Amino acid sequence: RGYRLEEKSYKKPQENKQD
């Protein structure tokens, strides 16, 4: 699925937007 790799990739970019 490749969602595990995005699991951290999708969570990191989200915090970047808040910064």
Image: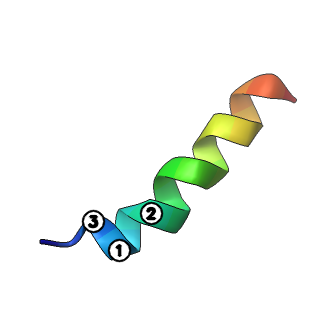
Alpha-carbon neighbours of circle 2 within 10 Å: few (<14), some, or many (≥20)? few
Mark 3: which secondary structure?
helix
- Mark 3 Cα within 10 Å, few/some/many (few <14, many 20+)? few
Q: Position of residue 12 (x, y in %)?
A: 64, 53
* Type of the residue with mark 3: Tyr
Alpha carbons under labels 2 and 3: distance apart: 6 Å
* Pointer 3 residue: 3
Q: CA distance from mark 1 to mark 2?
A: 5 Å
Q: How is the image coloured?
A: rainbow
Classify mark 1: residues with Cα within 10 Å, few (<14), some (14-19) or many (20+). Answer: few
* Residue 6 in picture, x, y percent from top left: 38, 62
Mark 2 sits on what residue? 7
Quadrant for the C terminus, please.
top right
The alpha-carbon separation of the residues under discs 1 and 3 comes to 4 Å
Residue pointed to by mark 1: 4
Contact flag, marks 2 and 3 (Cβ < 8 Å) = yes
Report if the CB atoms under discs 1 and 2 are less than 8 Å apart: yes
Q: Residue 1 placed where, x, y %?
A: 12, 71
Please say if 6 is above or below 18. below
Horizontal placement of 7 versus 19: left or right?
A: left
Q: Check contact, mark 1 vs mark 3: CB within 8 A.
A: yes
Q: Secondary structure at mark 2?
A: helix
Q: Residue at x 58, y 51 (%)?
A: 11
Element under label 1? Answer: helix
